[in-house]
Image: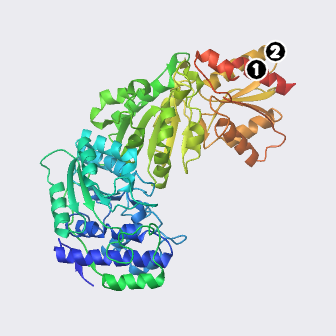
Amino acid sequence: MTTTATISDLSTARDVARQLRVDSVRTSTSAGSGHPTSSMSAADLLAVLVTRHLRYDWDSPENDANDHLIFSKGHASPLLYSVFKAAGVISDEELMSGYRRFGQRLQGHPTPVLPWVDVATGSLGQGLPDGVGVALAGRYLDEVPYRVWVLCGDSEMAEGSMWEALDKAAYYRLSNLVAIVDVNRLGQSGPTELQWDLDAYARRASAFGARVLIIDGHDLEEIDEAYRSATDRTDDRPTVILARTLKGRGFSEVENLEGWHGKPLPKEMADRAIRELGGESDLVVRGPVPMDEAPVSRSAPGGTELPRYQVGDKVATRRAYGDALTALGGGNSRIVALDGEVGNSTYSEEFAKAFGDRYFEMYIAEQQMVAAAVGLSVRHYIPFASTFAAFLSRAYDFIRMASISRADIRLVGSHAGVEIGADGPSQMALEDLAMLRAVQGSTVLYPSDAVSTASLVAAMVELDGVSYLRATRGAYPVLYESGEVFPVGGSKVLRSGPSDAVTLVGAGVTLHECLAAASLLASDGIAARVIDLYSVKPVDTATLSEAVAATEGRIIVVEDHHPEGGLGSAVAEALLAAGSPALHFTHLAVRDLPGSGSTAEQLAAQEIDADHIAAAARALVS
């Protein structure tokens, strides 16, 4: 066994490349699944990188000065895990017995359960966008000269998100970002769109503002020179290295042949491959370590006074979000904000005006916005990303992958529901609560006034995982005194009495309609309990159960959302799980395709306004 702690020569890199190929075959065959041929094509690229250019302290993955290595091509996990073995941080035993096995950390695609993995990949088109976020932190926030190296597959270059990433990388002059594209020509079901037309890739990447280098991905001297050039900071462009490679490189029976994507080699075939590749080895080789740098400051935030509002004043919750975020940003330099070119509607522009160096405009690129938030969270920042709630749906895959990455990101969606009025259905988020509730470990919040919004934005700073706040377009009366506390997982009972006959549950605009309906019912002699369900996930089961017990099981849930997966689902699931007896449940939601119209017309048409709520309550009580 050989251990090297300095920059290796290319002869050593060649030996490492051979070991990486052999181990990629061994581990996938042992597991009975995996992508050995996709790993073999990039083995030379990784061998030169980790032995000569990746500045990384493998014993201290938390070192702020470390470079970052992201496998956007996450299915090449046999290669990544073989790299970890070559670096001496996992054993050959774990490589052979832990890959793709239940309960083990060498999962089918990389996740941050491993300390050397920044983000989960495997859903193609995400590693490079995540890398943009990490590189943003390095250039503008950490101000530490680490590099972000991203191994990309040629198939994923068909994903629009990859080009969003290159566009923003060029816009923000991320010379610390290097995309290494393994152009092996073959995808899952056949040749890729451009195959080996590296000039076409180059024209596209250049058009997006990247510096492009074309190399033979199996020529170690060319690879080495390309990496050296990529780290030359003579200009402010990101670098794209287009490496022409052969899938299955090194084993003649599969090299450059279709039909081997995602297939481990059978045992006898794997034995032949290992012999042809030169046999097993246990080299442990480490490349350069990071330059000594002062650690990034993580000072504790100072005290923050949230904005104050007067009861009865009409304030949009989206406005309160911008106010609160700006106030919080003044006391915590780790808070950063991103937006999708609607900052004057989400009011994130208030944060931008106050803290422009911590604000990143992603323009109309919601996938990149979420990915950049994930990358910033890798560097321990506290990202808030905002846009119209409807537009988060196109970034949903990035949101669910953020959860798998164990990223702590905060999303804010404004202009939700039919309440927005005349813009019509393309702008109306009517699925967002269901979408975000379905994310593993998520928190979903839906405030109804400015005070609760400010309190919940402050609470989001401390939340783990993916959190989401749904903001309303229109201005509605402030319901609570400034300073009121809104614990995540709680709710507020705004009207109640000993003779309550029915429970009305709302959030956002429908809470105000529930309050108006309660007044209408009171004139009929019907007392209604009104609950502000500002925390949709987790939901306040205790308060809901107490309310239905007091109102003999009669409950009406009203939401400006499709009936599937929103407030009604959250309430019903909670009460059923709690074993609440004899429920008489009415669910008012947006059931018809809306068009344009005023807010009042929209709410009435969907039967979620005060008059329809009151009518439903009368029917339930009678």
**Residue farthest to the right, as pictured:** 622
Asked whether residue 380 is in view, the answer is no
Asked whether residue 449 is in view, the answer is yes
- Residue 449 in the image, given as x and y percentages of width and height: 55, 25
Q: Which residue is mark 1?
A: 614
Q: Nearer the viewer, residue 143 or 19?
A: 19
Task: State the CA–CA distance, disc 1 to disc 2.
Answer: 10 Å
Q: As drawn, is 509 to the left or to the right of 335?
A: right
Residue type at the position of mark 1: Ala
**Residue farthest to the left, as pictured:** 234
Residue depicted at x 39% and y 37%: 365
User: Which badge, 1 or 2, is on the more N-terminal residue?
Assistant: 2
Q: Which residue is mark 2?
A: 524
Element assignment for label 2: loop
Looking at the rendered structure, the number of numbered marks drawn on it comes to 2
Q: Nearer the viewer, residue 306 or 418?
A: 418
Q: Looking at the rendering, in which quadrant would you find the C terminus?
A: top right
- Residue 124 in the image, given as x and y percentages of width and height: 42, 54
Labelled pair 1, 2 in contact (Cβ < 8 Å): yes
Element assignment for label 1: helix
Q: Nearer the viewer, residue 55 or 420?
A: 420
63 is higher (above) or lower (below) than 256: above
Colouring method of the image: rainbow
Query: Of discs 1 and 2, which sits in the foreground?
Result: 1
Residue depicted at x 81% and y 38%: 583
468 is higher (above) or lower (below) than 134: above
Residue type at the position of mark 2: Asp
Local packing at callout 1 (Cα closer than 10 Å; few below 14, some 14-19, many 20+) is: many
Q: As drawn, is 92 to the left or to the right of 287?
A: right
